[in-house]
Image: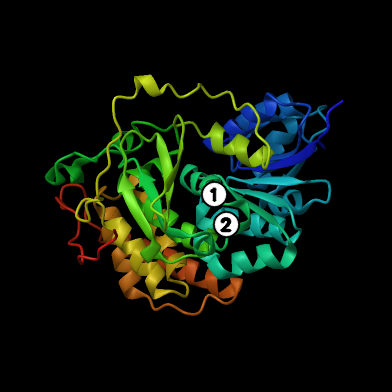
Amino acid sequence: MADFQQQTVTILGATGSIGTSTLDVIRRHPDRFRVHALTAHRQVEALAQLCRQFSPVYAVIADERSASELEQLLRGTGTKVLVGEEGLCQVAEDSFVDTVMAAIVGAAGLAPTLAAIREGKRVLLANKEALVMSGQLFMDAVSAHGATLLPIDSEHNAIFQCLPPERVRTPEQAGVARILLTASGGPFRETPLENLHKVTPEQACAHPNWSMGRKISVDSATMMNKGLELIEACWLFNTEPERIQVHVHPESIIHSMVEYCDGSVLAQLGSPDMRTPIAHALSWPERIDAGVEPLDLFELASFNFQRPDPERFPCLRLAAEAFAAGGTFPAVLNAANEIAVQAFLEGRLAFTGIPWLIEQVLSDMNPVPADSMEAILEQDGEARSRAGELLKVAPTTAAMSSFPENSGVKLS
């Protein structure tokens, strides 16, 4: 007889790469996990297929039109269809749910993730933008409601694994000197700077190591993902940017490291497969099979590390500056980045226009205290509006041939 209690799981963002990887792990352990709800934006057919496989109580989709299509596809299955943010929050805070995988990309994931936290759920955080936007409010809610927060980003999950469990929020008391945050460098780590303005969405989404969604792939290419992760790490591990050092590690085998005051460095290694951190968080503090091929150290010729090039990756600087400015600036940064990346993917903005647009929005706005969700969401909306206006005069691929000049901020 099993000596564990079966977990009931809601997956926010079930059709994305994190969602499908989560379901793959769950499929391997039907005695441990039961799916309660699956959500998607407008991927009706993909969500319907997953619902037929996992028989959730609820499926959530973005709008009424998509809901009508989904109801037709799920007729006779017993799965109830809910709509929009209200539906997302309902399945996140449902009393029958033990664990919520927060894998909706971008600001859209903030409300349901907070709803789960306020009900004291076990929250597996794959949506870094939610924490970047709300920072102190987010972590205060985790503490006030007794939620369990487990990071899913491979880097933060690696750091979590390298820290004593009782010192995750107080790493300095455990003798931690620095957190060493690794980055792959993306597909353009060695591309000549003068050619970056010609990068296409297809090239930017072709990550050399990881299989990810299009938005996250572009963030990896600009290294904005690492900027957001820098902010996220500060909140998760209650530390300062000065204690975090970014290392470009092209092999993506060492997912991050923790350096202790006695000179020891603990690293978490593994194949670049998101099922490893997902399985770790689902089963924590135990371990379960994730379906990941074992790492063959004999096949690895070497590990390489480089300092991030501030001229090539100005988004790192922008993230550090936004966090230093405080208040709602991280939310502004995230909003501007979401608009810029979407415009790039739609062919309306050059790749090198992404940091240009973000910097323009940051320079046009003044931070206010991030002391309420209303203030954060208001600034998010203003930033998106300003970014939309700037897109009308944004540099095209033909007009921009290099990144904006950086201010020389030292990130490591």
Check residue 207 in the rendering and tell me which mark sits there, or answer none.
none
Label 2 residue SS: loop
Location of the C terminus (image quadrant)? bottom left
Q: Is 389 or 198 nearer to us in this picture?
A: 198
Residue at x 49% of width, y 49% of height: 159
Left or right, 279 with reference to 314: right
Most extreme residue toward the front is: 262
Give the residue type at disc 1.
Phe
How packed mark 2 is, by other alpha carbons closer than 10 Å (few <14, some 14-19, many 20 or more), is some
Q: Earlier in the sequence, mark 2 or mark 1?
A: 1
**In the rendered image, which residue does mark 2 sit on?**
168
Q: Is residue 107 visible?
A: yes
Q: CA distance from mark 2 to mark 1?
A: 7 Å
Label 1 residue SS: helix
**In the rendered image, which residue does mark 1 sit on?**
160
Left or right, 264 with reference to 407: right
Badge 2 vs badge 1, beta-carbon distance below 8 Å: yes
Residue at x 30% of width, y 54% of height: 354
| Count of marks placed on residues | 2
